[in-house]
Amino acid sequence: MASDLVSVNPNALNSTIEFLTAMVTPTLLISATGSLVLSTSTRLGRVVDRVRDLEKRLGEMIYVEDKSEVPLYDVRVEVIVDLIDKVTSRSRILQKAMAAFYYGLALFILTSVTIAVAGLFGIYRWLPIPVGVIGIMFLLYGSLLMIKETRMATATVNAEMDFTWKLAREVAPKEVISKYAKRGRFGGLNPAKMKSTDGPKVSNTLGGE
């Protein structure tokens, strides 16, 4: 046994280790891409649920009998339509990003296969490099789409918050407005000039239930 260990060809051993290392390397990218696919799929599911919720709210607003009793009715409808447009665009971007990640995942797996073919048969030794590079490009493209979607998500949240404060400015009592006007929440409005009212009860705002 000792003589067999001594007689092992170091060059062959190094070549085997390098071959196995080359095959394992794309696994890291495969794992990272799989995590991106999972997170993107989760975000897409939430966006689809948000679209359905906004559609439901829009339907409820359309069929309100006495629209004059709904605070900021026209603004509500406009904001809901604008949010539907934003989340629809987000869903399309997420679909493109997820497709890009799946393409990258497939290419990284193909990279491992081409490395095995090149190592076992000694052919197409150049093939793993362009396949891996193309996979990385798909990963980059999907990541850029996710950055764009994140910026749109921030814009959506800001639009909802802006409407919420506008609604609060419309229905909140003067004492409440005075409290938050000092923090700049009401855009520098003078609360003393606003009418004192207890405001209608608002149980359903765009911010969610």
Image (cartoon, rainbow, N blue to C red):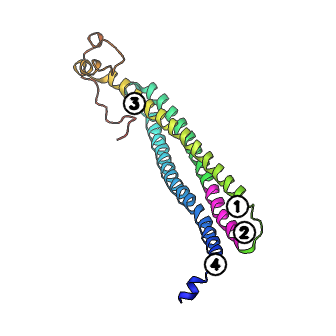
- The residue carrying mark 4 is 9
- The residue carrying mark 1 is 128
Residue 84 position in % (x across, y down)? 52, 37
Residue 155 position in % (x across, y down)? 48, 32
- The residue carrying mark 2 is 118
- Quarter-wise, where is residue 121 in the image? bottom right
Tag 1: amino acid: Pro
Pick the front one: 58 or 62:
58
The secondary structure type at the circle numbered 4 is: loop
Mark 1 or mark 3: name the one nearer the start of the chain.
1
Residue 73 position in % (x across, y down)? 42, 27
Judge the density around disc 2: few (<14), some (14-19), many (≥20) Cα neighbours within 10 Å: some
From the image, state whether disc 3 or disc 2 is nearer to you: 2
Residue 143 position in % (x across, y down)? 57, 45
Disc ID at residue 161: 3
Dominant secondary structure (helix, strand or loop) of the stretch shown in magenta: helix
Pick the front one: 172 or 32:
32
Pick the front one: 199 or 116:
116
**Mark 2 and mark 4 residues within 8 Å of each other at the beta carbon:** no
The answer to whether residue 87 is magenta is no
Residue visible at 49% across and 35% down in the picture: 83
Mark 1 or mark 4: name the one nearer the start of the chain.
4
The secondary structure type at the circle numbered 1 is: helix
The secondary structure type at the circle numbered 3 is: helix
Tag 4: amino acid: Asn
Pick the front one: 106 or 10:
10
Disc ID at residue 90: none
